[in-house]
Each structure stands twice: as C-alpha cells, then as structure tokens.
Amino acid sequence: MAEGFLLVLSGPSGSGKGTVSQALMEKKDDITFSISATTRKPRPTETNGENYFFLSEEKFKQMDEDGEFLESAFVHSNYYGTPKKFVMDEIGKGEIVLLEIDVQGALQIKKNYKEAVFIFLLPPTMDELRNRILKRGTESEEDIKIRFNNAFKELDFVGEYDFFVVNDEVENAVNDIEAIIHSEKLRVKRHKDIKLNITRQGGK
Ligand code: 5GP
C-alpha cells in the first residue's frame, strides 16, 4: 500500500482554491481535507468545524504555544493554522491530506515534511483574479485591496512549488491535480514493501 502524504495547495485569494478543493474532494475518496483553525470571522456561508475552526485570538495563540499546529501564519490580518494531530493520524492511515494554505505555511511544511507535494494554483489572468475577488462580495473594500496586493507577492513564490495548475476551468484544474496525485502515488519511494524482481537477460 502507498503511504499517505501531504498535498499542499496554495494560490492567491481568488485563484479558486476553495472551489477546486471541493470538486477534487467530491471526485476522490482517498483524500482528506484538513480543516484549518483561524481567527477570521466566518463568512455568511461558512460553518464552524466544516470550513474552519473559528477561534478567538487568545485560543489560537494558546494552541500555537502548545505546539498543536503543523504550521501557522498571519495572512490578510488574521491567524491561520493547521491542526497537527488530525493530519498526522490521517497520514498514518494512508490518506492523502489536502492542506489549502498560504505560501508562508507551505514553506514551513516544506522545511519539515520532505515527502509533501506542493501545488500552486494560478488564475488565468490577474484581471480575472480581481474580478473573482470582487464578485465574491464577502470582503470589505480594504480587505479586497489587501488580498489583491498579497496576490502579487504570493506569485513570487511559485518557484518553491513542485507543480503549477492554471484554474481557467475548475474541471481542467481538477484533472491536472488528479494526474499529479496519480503519478505521486506511483513513486517508488512511497512504497516501502515494493519488491523489484529484476532478472538479467540470460536468466542470471
Ligand atoms: P480565506 O480567509 O480566504 O479563507 O483564506 C485566506 C488565506 O489563508 C488563503 O490563502 C488560505 O489558503 C490561507 N489559509 C487557510 N488556512 C490556512 C492554514 O491553516 N495555514 C495557512 N498558513 N494558511 C491558511
């Protein structure tokens, strides 16, 4: 059996990470989504424990101090973190665990978890990115500005990732990510019990 691994998906706000992750989760039953903790206020469509664990800043900082996060970062004026225990338990069961996190978090994972796979999701154009952030209509004008400026900074980090996927159409992006997962599962190093029976020509 292949070992579980971390699949890190990053991309600027408006690149469509949420939509792509959801579509991917619906198609694949061997992927578990890691629900992050955040100090951000929930959007009207979001539910605690489903989209995020919405925490007070005090509680978040306590958990961080107690080493309960695999990584954590301050993104667009709020704290975000990946709960460690859940992720490690799922990996232990052979699951692929999807972390939808920002570049700061991805760099922390890269340092500590060499076997993780890193995908950067790109919008087809920066104009389209801006349209998507505006269309969502859930952020204040100030927050939209912060997110758009951060998008440019985040794009500088694409070179730190293993793969890029362009989200022109959700279906295309999901197909690309499925192809990446498929080949990652075939990596010899992910199969401890593989036996390669190679016989030399001539039967030696
Ligand atoms: P949003 O507020 O739009 O849900 O997310 C804002 C940003 O925070 C996105 O780039 C998202 O990927 C990132 N994010 C969400 N959860 C985590 C997390 O646990 N850790 C880190 N580092 N970033 C996160």
Image: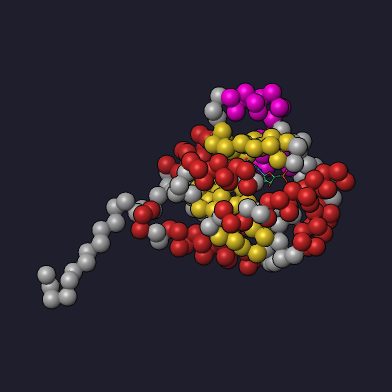
Q: Percent position (x, y) of residue 149? A: 78, 50
What residue lies at 48% left-to-right and 41% top-to-bottom? 112
Q: In this view, does 200 lie above or below 101?
A: below
Evaluate whether residue 166 shows in this view: yes
Q: Is residue 185 left or right of residue 128?
A: left
Q: Which of 52 and 118 is in front in this view?
A: 118
Is 93 in the magenta?
A: no
What residue lies at 88% left-to-right and 46% top-to-bottom? 141
Q: Nearer the viewer, residue 32 or 121?
A: 121
What residue lies at 84% left-to-right and 50% top-to-bottom? 137
Q: In which quarter of the image is residue 74?
A: top right
**Residue at the outermost right position:** 141
Q: Nearer the viewer, residue 140 or 148?
A: 148
Highlighted range, magenta: 46-65
Q: Percent position (x, y) of residue 120? A: 61, 56
Q: In this view, does 122 lie to the left or right of 139?
A: left
Q: Percent position (x, y) of residue 193? A: 29, 52
Q: Is residue 86 above or below residue 174?
A: above
Q: Name the quarter where the C terminus is drawn.
A: bottom left
**Residue at the outermost bottom position:** 202
State the colouring used for the structure image: secondary structure
**Numbered circles on residues, count:** 0
Q: Is residue 36 above or below residue 61?
A: below
Q: Nearer the viewer, residue 199 or 26?
A: 199
**Rendering quadrant holding ligand 1:** top right
Q: Is residue 95 left or right of residue 189?
A: right
Evaluate whether residue 21 shows in this view: no
What residue lies at 80% left-to-right and 45% top-to-bottom? 146
Q: Percent position (x, y) of residue 103? A: 63, 47
Is 53 in the magenta?
A: yes
